Image (tube, coloured by chain):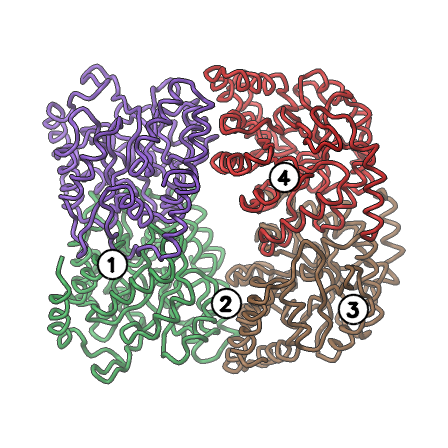
Chain colours: A red, B purple, C green, D brown
């Protein structure tokens, strides 16, 4: 591990090259990067022997690159990041950086359990091309993850990160909601630009938007299931697993919301709820990967202990898409 | 208890007088009552010795009658109905019927733990003037409240009720979410016209609206905290504790949503979230009654075991209103 | 409702007749009633048309009367008390009083949601023959049921009850654990003699026994599943649904624990866990009543909305008994 | 990553040296290692700059070595293992192996999120001296961690582990209870010798002991709070954070249980509940390390994001020990 002094110089050294030209970001002027838009949280393809299949990863990205996404999230919960080694995590970021269109943003999930490991991973991901670090709440010791502890954690990470930081709260995986008071405090940090909230409580999203309105803090919905409601409450975009298979439709929903066509948005949103639930809460990544295959992408196996779907689960998954007219 | 035959004739006897002329309802043509709009869930005022204070109840109603509410809910969770005797429950409905404007709807909470008691209470409330019965999920045996059990319960109640039935799901009190599949099945019953959902999961609300779209099933948001999002997803109104103190503002939010002024709606919604949380989840009915006093209504004590707020709680309650510009 | 003065005189008037000669209780000397032992929580038999079948109730009691129980609990959670009218609740207590052996204790569940209703029910149950009132935590407004509120509630009930009070915590039904600090405070009340804890956390039971050791406070396990462990930690008995069907075995387990035959106790306890779970958490009262029929008692239907078991559930229920050698 | 063939030969190669002479274990005869007894889950000491302090680790072990423990657990939840790098994890095991008495068992927590990483860590820990691998449930994708997935995971790990495996269920950290049916299935694996259950549900522990009685499956209580009850139900020992500070007392409690002195055991158990809760659920590892300092061990800081106790927390922690006579 590197000591504080080293981090400081690393950060200075990195800042020139890393604070690259992203939309809305003007280095040195304090203006924050604009993260508004839709992002698919990219899955990590594996071979039959559970090696990362970088070729398939690039193929998927090329297909996904045709949609008007704001960028890509790698190593969100759908990226099976807890199953990757540190070097795999960095290699995935590096490959995605190369394969994706230059004008899009690369948000990389750099969260680890310890603050120090998170800092190191964040710096390393910045070095291999991440534009923004998306940092999940540490959770194994959730009983001690008070607002104070989480504020300390994120402040340290944001202080030492050469790239902007997005908070990431995903209680279905972590058993932990990043408290609103912690979010409000952290929104004042110059290097924290927003939050991805996957909890699905739009009252909470509205409150966060409201209480951070003076900080230009940007909230992304963590799922397509409550994307429209999040836009209505002031979110600026979404990280949507469903966009891996219904990319056009999720982007269409974004457009309808942004242009105030709420009736059409509602109809489209309605038809996306069941498919979205199917590839997130109900069948998880195995469901998402199976569905990707049906939509012409490479899905492939998950790493163990995640198991592939049973035939009955596959049938139910398919039904959630066909009954809404998507298959 | 009355037997099935008696119920049948009671129902026929009641149907002429009870299926009164409510907006959008045409007896015999199968058109359902239109429940769209905003409702304050009326509190039950008590004297210092914990008797129901019917005079204060009427005074409150006269003040509330000046707002463009669609009607009033009595004996929702905010009405302290579990603390009332059966005769008090009926007397409250009767008094509210007389005190309220004739052109408004009276939704009466008639839920009890047993199906039979719920049927009896529903019929009796219809007799004393309720337009619609709002029936909370039974919950003490929640471990056995499967979809099948709940479908059986509500079907029986709706079969025997002389007035339309609204389902009521309020997991913060009952520990039970009325399952979506049960709602979809029940939406097909000719005497079940809608649902009040207080859970706050707007993805679920959207799904319910979507899956019942052929049944003309009407969903009401159970709280002002997610009212705008619920409108966005297809709800037709809300039962909002906050409307007891900020009636004009909640009706204004309704109007903004119905007329598609989403930006203004968002700003207003944002400012209502904290006050709403304060008088619902955070400080409950004691908080709501205290706030009613500050806004010129009669609040008064709750029945025990509900305790009045501590001075620190009062201070926090007030802050949630002042910091948003409402006091 | 009666006013405070009336309650006071009612209580004095009742005290002579009601503070009857129960084991270990000497009126005026402050010695508390000894509630140590095993109690079946009696089910409420219903006819095919859902009327209370008092004849079957008496028959069941006569059969249960042959086991060395300390007494009977009526209107615990297994008694379907939320489905009974007030007069049915009293009539059941009255009939059980008459049908049961004179030397046994009658613990009657008198809890209601409001403090006042609980007081009235407690007094009335005392008048019709209850020896001890078992008072479940109010729960509909659980978000406001702080220790202070619960202490206030139970203190009022115990102050005005002519018979000793037993606290009753059953989180599976109420969603609420009576907090340890509230129990410790309440244990000092001269008319509160103990607690029935159905939560199954024996660490908590041990802590309660430890922190109330100076108050002669008696803890009853609320289920046969953790009866032996509760004895090990200092409980003095149990209220066990399973005793309605395996009365001899539960009493045998008590005897083994009391005489320090821990190895045999362990073997017996092991064989009771699955059957116990089956008639409590897994299949609830419908399972218990079905099993009663297989053991020669009257089970009969539950009141709606409780549904009878499906054939598959019946099969699983039977298996939990046969695989442990009880059928 | 190594392929299956490599693992196979690695395992054979390791078996001679690694299946060392542990009590009750006779290599080749299929008799399982005897893990009965008490284990402190050793904390990982850090310097002021958050480096692992191996010197202090050895000092603590020398002090702990004076108690009649069966052995030591390293990298249980109290070892801050999620904050250690892979090489730190192995170095800690190696150092503990060297510092601890030869006749004691070394249980090493080798769980990772992926099956493959867990296998590799388990093999590596065996190579540096672990006697037994204690494998926590993977948990980040808990929504998909069905019994089937967990059985697959543990079977693979046990197949490829050169040392016996102990299952480890700790829902407070993982949000996941290893299901009883999965435990029963896994108990039949020749290389799975037992389970550490930290959930605190002794009914569950009794059921597991009962249903695995033909497999010589050994259950360890995961906390001193329910140690006596676990012995009563058939557990053979415990992994107790409290043993890091009250080692003599926890071993005394073991002795009292094993020799059937249940009354004295109860008294001692009672006095250990509050201190135990304080250094586990209430104040976590920061509380445990603070208390270690008061008892003459090296505690030191935790790695971030774990924060040290506030003065008020320290005071409450101390009170939980003084009020029970331990300080």
Disc 2 versus disc 1: distance between alpha carbons?
Answer: 30 Å
* Nearest to N terminus: mark 2 or mark 1: 1
Q: Chain of mark 4?
A: A
- What whole-number distance in Å separates the C-alpha atoms at marks 4 and 1? 45 Å
Q: Nearer the viewer, mark 2 or mark 1?
A: 1
Residue labelled with disc 3: D57
The answer as to whether the residues below labels 2 and 4 share one chain is no
Q: Specify the quadrant of the image occupied by residue B259.
A: top left
**Label 1 sits on residue:** C115
**Residue B21, located in which quarter of the rendered image?**
top left
Local SS, label 3: helix
Asked which secondary structure carries label 4, the reply is strand
Residue D303 in the image: above or below residue A153: below
Task: Name the disc covering residue A168, or none.
Answer: 4
- Residue at point 56%, 66% (across, down): D313
Query: Which of the numbered marks, if any, corresponds to residue C203?
Result: 2
Taking the view exactly as shown, the residue that stands out farthest to the bottom is C29
């Amino acid at each position: 591990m590197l000591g504080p002094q080293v981090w400081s110089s690393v950060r200075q050294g990195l800042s020139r090259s890393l604070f690259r030209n992203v939309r809305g970001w003007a280095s040195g002027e304090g203006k924050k990067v604009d993260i508004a838009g839709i992002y698919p949280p990219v899955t990590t393809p594996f071979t039959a022997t559970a090696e990362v299949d970088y070729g398939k990863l690039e193929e998927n990205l090329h297909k996904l690159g045709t949609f008007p996404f704001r960028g890509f999230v790698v190593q969100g919960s759908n990226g099976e990041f807890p199953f990757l080694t540190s070097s795999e995590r960095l290699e995935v970021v590096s490959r995605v950086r190369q394969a994706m269109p230059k004008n899009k943003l690369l948000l990389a999930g750099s969260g680890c359990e310890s603050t120090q490991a998170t800092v190191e991973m964040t710096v390393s991901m910045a070095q291999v091309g991440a534009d923004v670090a998306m940092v999940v709440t540490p959770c194994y010791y959730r009983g001690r993850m008070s607002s104070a502890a989480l504020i300390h954690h994120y402040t340290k990470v944001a202080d030492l990160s050469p790239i902007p930081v997005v908070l990431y709260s995903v209680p279905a995986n972590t058993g932990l909601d990043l408290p609103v008071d912690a979010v409000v405090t952290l929104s004042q940090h110059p290097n924290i630009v927003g939050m991805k909230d996957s909890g699905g409580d739009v009252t909470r999203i509205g409150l966060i938007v409201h209480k951070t309105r003076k900080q230009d803090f940007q909230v992304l919905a963590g799922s397509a299931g409550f994307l429209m409601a999040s836009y209505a409450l002031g979110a600026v975009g979404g990280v949507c697993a469903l966009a891996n298979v219904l990319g056009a439709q999720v982007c269409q929903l974004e457009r309808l919301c942004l242009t105030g066509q709420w009736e059409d948005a509602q109809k489209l949103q309605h038809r996306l709820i069941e498919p979205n639930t199917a590839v997130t809460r109900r069948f998880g990544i195995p469901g998402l990967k199976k569905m990707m295959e049906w939509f012409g992408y490479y899905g492939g196996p998950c790493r163990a202990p995640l198991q592939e779907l049973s035939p009955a689960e596959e049938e139910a998954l398919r039904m959630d898409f066909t009954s809404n007219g998507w298959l």
